[in-house]
Amino acid sequence: MMVTTTTLSKTCFIAAPAGANLGVLRAMLEERGLRVLVPSDLEVGVDWASEIQKQLGQADLVIGVITADRSSPWVLFELGQASALGRRIVLIASPKAEPIPFALHQFLVLKTEIDNADAIGFALDQVLSAPTNSKRERSSPPKALIRLGNKADEFIERLDRELAAKHWRSIEGLVADALRDSGADLVVASPNGDLGADIAVWSDVLEPFVGNPLLVEVKGAVKGKTDVSRAMWQLAEYVGASGSRWGVLLYGVGPEFDEEIFVASPPNILVLSIRSLLERLRQQAFPELIRDLRNRRVHGVR
């Protein structure tokens, strides 16, 4: 039996690929008294990133949608923000879609099409009646830690080519590829370089140290320490606004690492040149590297 109410006391944010048919899902939510928020409903001209963060902050429930015929990195970015904000999350995935990334297994996953009213209605009834602080155990072991080894040389050669050509967006892709190959559970590159962070990284190993997702900003070139400090503060503002805990600033061309760079800089931002990152990933998995950098930042130890 469907539960209806005239008072919309709860809010649900839907993260779905553009063009996905959300009619049935909207109806199921509204019948249960939830006000529905969907990014595609935003008015033209609004500050998209700020409004999304505002809506996620208001949401009692967040539903992510993965379909077989449409994909969108926005969905993963929005789910990452929702997770950082501690929101209750349900993932609806088409049985015909690609395998769900391991880092999303922590959420309640409903394998069905988004027009299956019976399955969606049943799942919503269970979710809405469950205790707010209930947690779902992971069903798979953590991903093994991996070092780049000699593959680091390939990435460094690629970095040199992209820097020489000033292909800044290609450098972001290079960094994302290196992180995927060095032990991160899930790496999502932003489809828009103006969001305040270029890459979001999830890692079970890093969860106790820096939380999930870890936000990464990639700069092709910075002129000096002042530019590095300014970029760190900008990233810190976005980390705070998104609900995440830590961020990493990586740059291709700029000053050598210097402890002075950290002076008067935000305490939850790490900074490293991309070349140094690749060299260290030769011997360390990415989660190990970030854990060590974080410990050095917080405790003053290597």
Image: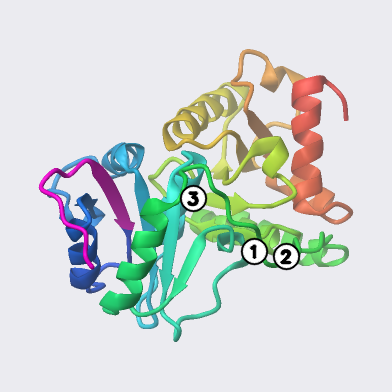
Q: Outermost residue, front direction?
A: 1
Read off the magenta span: 1-14
**Does residue 109 show up magenta in the picture?**
no
- Measure how far apart labels 3 and 1 are at the Cα level: 19 Å
Res. 290 in view: yes
Residue tagged 1: 177
Tell me which residue sits at (35%, 75%) in the image: 119
Q: Outermost residue, bottom direction?
A: 96
Q: Outermost residue, top direction?
A: 264
Res. 191 in view: no
Crowding at label 1, few (<14), some or many (≥20) Cα neighbours within 10 Å? some
Q: Say left or right for 70 vs 24.
A: right
Name the front one of labels 2 and 3: 3
62 shown above or below 144: above
Name the front one of labels 3 and 1: 3
Residue tagged 3: 80
Mark 3 or 1 closer to N-term? 3
Residue tagged 2: 181
Label 1 with label 2: CB-CB less than 8 Å: yes
Residue 264: % across, % down? 62, 13
Quadrant in which residue 254 is drawn: top right
From the viewer's side, name the closer residue of 229 and 34: 34
Quadrant in which residue 165 is drawn: bottom right
Crowding at label 2, few (<14), some or many (≥20) Cα neighbours within 10 Å? some
From the viewer's side, name the closer residue of 142 and 255: 142
Q: Say left or right for 197 vs 138.
A: left
Q: Quadrant of the C terminus?
A: top right
Mark 1 residue type: Asp
Mark 2 residue type: Asp
Residue 244: % across, % down? 52, 37
From the viewer's side, name the closer residue of 211 and 46: 211
Residue 261: % across, % down? 68, 22
